[in-house]
């Protein structure tokens, strides 16, 4: 499924909730369903700078696509990174680099986060796109 289609699905899912408390509960559920990251990636080397909470991110390049693993020590942030992975995981590097993550504004996520969490969200997106850029550069594409 394309980056755009996945985002449209997320917007549809979030539209079912009346208020932000329900949306936060859904974010927490998404975070709880995020697969465990391997212990080897829960080190300072994989921490994302710019996040108030600890967020670890790893990416792998397989068969022309980027696959992410992540975790956080904060339940809401874990849900946010789960959303980002839902959109970008398994996509071609160029699609990740070019992606306009419009779902963030559409579901009201950015407006309902504290300034520090919003900065963390931006840092997570930036890091995921940088991984894609690095893999693409290393492949000479």
Image: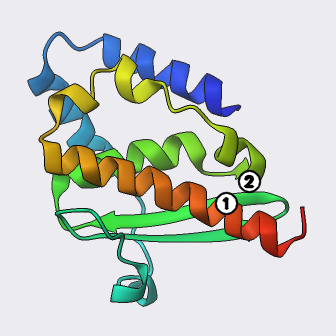
Q: Between residues 79 and 44, which one lies in front from this camera angle?
A: 44
In this rendering, the answer to whether 56 lies above or below 38 is above
- Identify the residue shown where x is 59% and y is 62%: 130
In this rendering, the answer to whether 101 lies above or below 73 is above
Quarter of the figure with the C terminus: bottom right
In this rendering, the answer to whether 40 lies above or below 21 is below
How dense is the environment of label 1, judged by Cα within 10 Å: few (below 14), some, or many (20 and up)? many
Is 87 situated left or right of 11 in this image? Answer: right
Is 113 situated left or right of 78 in this image? Answer: left
- Identify the residue shown where x is 60% and y is 51%: 89
Marker disc for residue 108: none
Report whether residue 43 is seen: no
Give the alpha-carbon distance from disc 2 to disc 1, as whole Å: 5 Å
How dense is the environment of label 2, judged by Cα within 10 Å: few (below 14), some, or many (20 and up)? many
Secondary structure at badge 2 equals: helix
Q: Between residues 10 and 124, which one lies in front from this camera angle?
A: 124
Image location (x, y in percent) of residue 85: 49, 50
Marker disc for residue 132: 1
Secondary structure at badge 1 equals: helix
Residue receiving disc 2: 93
Residue 111, quarter of picture: top left
Report whether residue 51 is seen: yes
Quarter of the figure with the N terminus: top right
Image location (x, y in percent) of residue 134: 69, 69
Label located before the other in sequence (2 or 1):
2
Report if the CB atoms under discs 2 and 1 are less than 8 Å apart.
Answer: yes
- Identify the residue shown where x is 37% and y is 48%: 122
Image location (x, y in percent) of residue 118: 24, 43
């Amino acid at each position: 499924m394309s980056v755009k289609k996945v985002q449209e699905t997320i917007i549809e899912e979030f539209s079912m909730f009346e208020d932000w408390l329900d949306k936060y509960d859904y974010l927490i559920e998404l975070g709880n369903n995020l697969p465990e990251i391997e212990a080897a990636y829960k080190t300072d080397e994989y921490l994302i700078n710019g996040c108030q909470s600890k967020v670890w991110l790893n990416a792998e390049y397989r068969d022309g696509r980027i696959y992410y693993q992540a975790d956080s020590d904060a339940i809401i942030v874990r849900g946010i990174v789960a959303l980002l992975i839902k959109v970008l995981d398994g996509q071609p590097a160029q699609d990740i680099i070019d992606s306009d993550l419009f779902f963030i504004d559409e579901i009201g996520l950015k407006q309902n986060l504290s300034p520090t969490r919003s900065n963390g969200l931006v840092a997570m997106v930036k890091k995921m796109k940088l991984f894609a850029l690095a893999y693409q550069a290393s492949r000479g594409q």
